[in-house]
Image: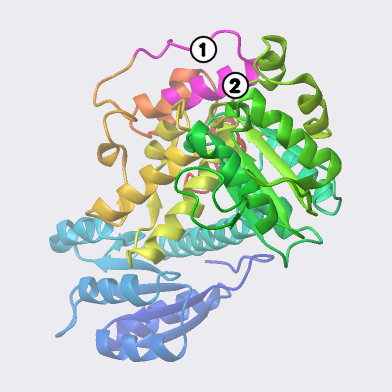
Amino acid sequence: MKPKHGAAVTSVLVVEDDRSSREALARALSDVGMEVAVAGSGEEAIDHLRLSPADVVVSDVMMGRLSGIDLLSHVEAHHPDTSVILVTGHGTIDSAVEAMRRGAYDYVTKPIDLDRLELVVRRAHRRQSLLRENQDLRQELRRRFSVAGIIGQSVVMRRVLEQVEQVAGTNATVLISGESGTGKELVATAIHHNSARAEARMVKVNCAALPESLIESELFGHERGAFTGAHRTRKGRFELADGGTMFLDEIGDLTLATQVKLLRAIQEREVERVGGQTPIHVDVRLIAASKHDLKQAMLAGKFRDDLYYRLNVITLHIPPLRDRLGDVPLLLDHFLALFCKEHNRTIRGFSAAARAKLMTYDWPGNVRELRNLVESLVVTARSDEITVQTLPDGVAPHRESPLLQLPMGRPLEHVERLYTLRTLELVGGNKSRAAKMLGIGKKTLYRRLHQYGVDTGEEAPSAD
């Protein structure tokens, strides 16, 4: 073997109870530029790793009290960034294969082909480096493409994030539109927390949840005796939000009569309590949201045109999740980390096939549905990986859906992504078969999957 130049130095721990074999392996790996340490037993290896972690452990399977497979279990639990390669005789190949199922990177058989051993060690190190880079990249993406919990790397969500940052520092009224579950309240909260009013209160009102008979009292307050049951004077939400931000969710559900009073509060910066006659000055920044098309409601006579134009100073539209499926991997990773911490669970992540399936789902409940699904999967998980088989039938029917049931009227890029991911799902995540079915090379498939945010967990081939 000849030294390889230009590559990162690989640190290797050789674990072998036979001294001559241990020294031969150490010498061979050292000769090709690797940093090599040795241990004569599994116990000695554990002590060494505690003080000096290695990129790769090369261990014999058959040793004294602590076998190579026992050592593998320890490394998996305490040194997840270290790859394990097992050395086995022909009679113990079955146990080595079983060890691979339990997390070993690979195995080599005796007598050892030193060229193959070097290749396997370098591949193992490269894979760990890629996994670390991928993890760092995900953290960077979460940092770059999130504002106060809003997560997205798609073009449309980056535009939303830019708008949030632009309008937060102003005092302008903001109207947020989008389907239920897209995160309108989260966007409103982000605007408030990044504004000059961040230290003041943000008062939230769901207009759809309040009965018509109470909405005016809730918003504007009431005087004692204003109506049956009004035993004391009560401040309304506008007064409580004085100096801060008022968020009116589902503003389209307000009655026309209430809309008149709301318009006055916005224009005159004052409210009048129910049963009162004295105007009360309020300094409130208003953020409103609706899942309905307020312009259509205005044209239909259900929403006042003067209020609509007063609200329509700055508009933000939050797209449904089905129109930004490229954000699904980021959201999956974010909520997985969140709920693993909350419920004290350890889950490595989603399999490639599970990610592909979740990126072909339409998400009618949007981000709220995805969040609830991930929490359910974390709580009920029986292994350290979420696979297609663990997904509920509503998201992943346990049957082969027709591959060509693709949506019409969508951009070609969307259809290509959907077709690619459904093909990968159909073959159970086998990328070689998927590439063959799609009529493209594996390198092209890996490039597409990278663009879609699907972590393959493997190094892309150098050529098709």
Q: Please name whichever residue, 68 or 295, is drawn nearer the observer in this view of the structure.
A: 295
Which is nearer the eye, 198 or 143? 198
Q: Which mark, residue 1?
A: none
Which residue is the site of mark 2?
414
Q: CA distance from mark 1 to mark 2?
A: 9 Å
**Colour theme:** rainbow
Q: With respect to residue 354, does 344 lie above or below?
A: below
From this view, report whether residue 249 is shown above or below residue 132.
above
Secondary element under disc 1, as helix, strand or loop, is loop
Q: To which quarter of the image does residue 422 belong?
A: top left
In the foreground, 196 or 458: 196
Q: Earlier in the sequence, mark 1 or mark 2?
A: 1
Res 369 quadrant in image: top left
Q: Is residue 407 magenta?
A: yes
Quickly name the residue at label 1: 407
- Residue 116: quadrant of the picture: bottom left
Q: Where is 79 relative to 7, above or below?
A: below
At a point 65% along the width and 53% down the height, the residue shown is 141
| Label 2: element kind | helix
Where residue 221 appears, as percent x and y from the top left, is: 62, 49
* Residue 158 covered by magenta stretch: no
Instruction: Give the residue type that dot 2 points to.
Output: His
Amino acid type at image mark 1: Pro
Q: Residue at x 74, y 58 (%)?
A: 242
Quadrant housing the C terminus: top right
Chain part drawn in magenta: 402-422
Task: Give neighbour class at mark 2: few <14, some 14-19, many 20+ (Cα, 10 Å).
Answer: some
Q: Position of residue 291 (x, y in %)?
A: 58, 28
